Amino acid sequence: MAHRQQKLIDELLGEAEAENDHSLQKQALDRATGDKIPTTLTPWEWQEYYAAHGVPESHKPSARPAPAKPWWRRLLSLD
């Protein structure tokens, strides 16, 4: 009810706001045309994405040092 009343007040005062499109269709279009890296694709879609856009830095493997042996292996000198 309050929303309806506020709308009437805005109309009377001439403070009409431009309505934003919050539809699922608009959201899907924004995701499809945006520069943001997708989060959920099938393996085949990832291949197509990488072919078209290249592999993003966040998806490349990082050169990490070899993990240290667990404390219990060092204690027991097991290899």
Image (cartoon, rainbow, N blue to C red):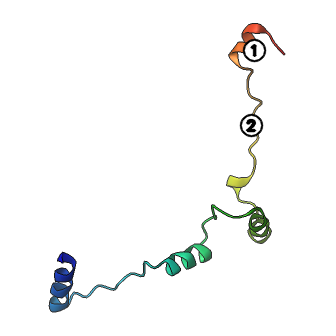
Specify the quadrant that holds the N terminus. bottom left
Height in image: 61 above or below 55?
Answer: above
Residue annotated with mark 1: 73
Quadrant in which residue 11 is drawn? bottom left
Nearer the observer, 45 or 10: 45
Q: Is residue 4 left or right of residue 33?
A: left
Q: What residue is shown at x 78% (from left), y 70% (from top)?
A: 48
User: Which amino acid does the dot numbered 2 rest on?
Assistant: Arg
Query: In x, y percent, where is residue 69?
Result: 75, 20
Instruction: Please tell me how crowded label 2 is: few (under 14), some (14-19), or many (20+) other residues with Cα within 10 Å.
Output: few
> In the rendered view, does 43 fall on the left or right side of 5?
right
Image-quadrant location for residue 73: top right
Pick whichever of labels 2 and 1 is earlier in the sequence.
2
Q: Which residue is mark 2?
A: 64
Element carrying mark 1 = helix
Q: How many marks?
A: 2
Residue 13 drawn above or below residue 70: below
10, above or below 69, in the image: below
Discs 2/1, front: 1
Q: Residues within 10 Å of mark 1 (few under 14, many from 20)?
A: few
How far across and how far down the image is residue 77, in percent?
79, 9
Tag 2's secondary structure? loop
Indicate the position of residue 27 as horizontal and vertical percent values: 51, 75
Residue 24 located left or right of residue 61: left
Q: Amino acid at mark 1?
A: Arg
Q: Quadrant of the C terminus?
A: top right
